[in-house]
Amino acid sequence: MAKSESKRQRQVSEMIRRNLSVVLHQEGQYIYENALVTLTNVVVSPDLQLAKIYVSVYNAIDKQSVILLLEQNKTRLQQGLTQRVRKQIRRVPNIDFYLDDTLDEMYRVTDLLDRLEKENQMGKDRSEDDVSE
């Protein structure tokens, strides 16, 4: 049975999300240029030693390459985060980046449903006039 997040984990996750968002806003243009990167979620391990950072990437053809750039610049980002939260937390968790493609999937499903509806393949009757003659 999986244990739910503790109150402290939620607090640390939110603190990291807020502060790392600022760091990414300041440093991001030097790391991933024109891509738009948004933090969607932060999950901290129960021992508060590791933070999984989930990001959405827009305006980039190869989203995984943006994640690789974030990983390559992890030390720089970790230092920026540490400078912002060092007075609020004793030990700053190590960070790892993960692609959150939830919104991309939602848009793909919406587009597919729209296409099916335009092609009249949603299982609806076309109209009452077409039924009988």
Image: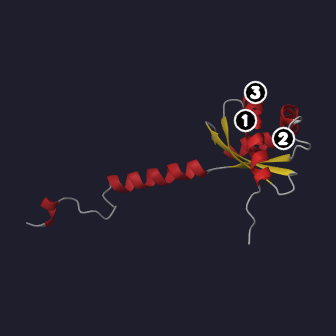
x%, y% of residue 132? Answer: 11, 67
User: Which image quadrant is residue 28 in?
Assistant: top right
Q: Closer to the camera: disc 3 or disc 1? A: 1
User: Which image quadrant is residue 113 in?
Assistant: bottom left
Q: Callout 2: 10 Å neighbours few (<14), some, many (20+)?
A: few
Residue 30: which numbered mark, if any?
Answer: none
x%, y% of residue 72? Answer: 84, 41
Name which residue lies at 39% across and 52% down: 115
x%, y% of residue 82? Answer: 87, 36
Q: Is residue 44 above or below residue 88?
A: below
The Cα atoms of the two marked residues, 1 and 2, are separated by 18 Å
x%, y% of residue 111? Answer: 45, 50
Q: Closer to the camera: disc 3 or disc 2? A: 3
Name which residue lies at 74% across and 31% down: 22
* Callouts 3 and 1 close, C-beta under 8 Å: no
Q: Which residue is mark 1?
A: 21
Residue type at the position of mark 3: Gln
For residue 62, say whether it is visible: no
For residue 119, say whether it is visible: yes
User: Which image quadrant is residue 85 in?
Assistant: top right
Residue type at the position of mark 2: Gln
Name which residue lies at 55% across and 53% down: 105
Q: Earlier in the sequence, mark 1 or mark 2?
A: 1
Q: Which residue is mark 2?
A: 72
Q: Closer to the camera: disc 1 or disc 2? A: 1
Q: Secondary structure at mark 1?
A: helix
The Cα atoms of the two marked residues, 3 and 2, are separated by 17 Å
Q: Secondary structure at mark 2?
A: helix
Q: Secondary structure at mark 3?
A: helix
Q: Which residue is mark 3?
A: 26
The Cα atoms of the two marked residues, 3 and 1, are separated by 9 Å
Q: Earlier in the sequence, mark 3 or mark 2?
A: 3
